[in-house]
Amino acid sequence: MGNIRQTYIKRVAVELVRNYPNDFTGDFSQNKKKVLELTDLGVQVDGHLQVVHKKVANRIAGYATRYVKRKRGT
């Protein structure tokens, strides 16, 4: 059995990957940075990106990583 993810996690991840296809790869840490940049889950504080909703950001980045790997076949 696999992981069950909420619809909003899947929707946001797929929408981000479709709108920014070159920004997302099979690397989770890079995808997490992009999710924080492109959504309101991260806030700029003194020039550094602070995570506001860490669990949601991790779930979106994780699903985006799986989606990209499955879509590109890597």
Image (cartoon, rainbow, N blue to C red):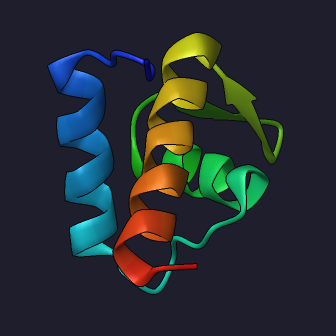
Res 26 → quadrant: bottom right
| Residue 69 position within the rendered picture, expressed as x and y whole percent measured from the top left | 51, 67
Q: Is residue 62 above or below residue 41?
A: below
Q: Residue at x 35, y 73 (%)?
A: 71
Name, please, the residue furthest toward the front.
1
Q: Residue at x 44, y 23 (%)?
A: 2
Q: Is residue 53 above or below residue 37?
A: above
Q: Is residue 45 visible?
A: yes
Q: Is residue 52 visible?
A: no
| Residue 61 position within the rendered picture, expressed as x and y whole percent measured from the top left | 54, 42
Left or right side of 16 for 22: right
Q: Residue at x 64, y 46 (%)?
A: 32
Give 18 or 68, whichever is nearer the viewer.
Answer: 68
Q: Is residue 2 above or below residue 43?
A: above
| Residue 1 position within the rendered picture, expressed as x and y whole percent measured from the top left | 43, 18
Left or right side of 12 for 39: right
Q: Is residue 49 above or below residue 55?
A: below
Give 12 or 6, whichever is nearer the viewer.
Answer: 6
| Residue 66 position within the rendered picture, expressed as x and y whole percent measured from the top left | 49, 52
Quadrant holding the C terminus: bottom right
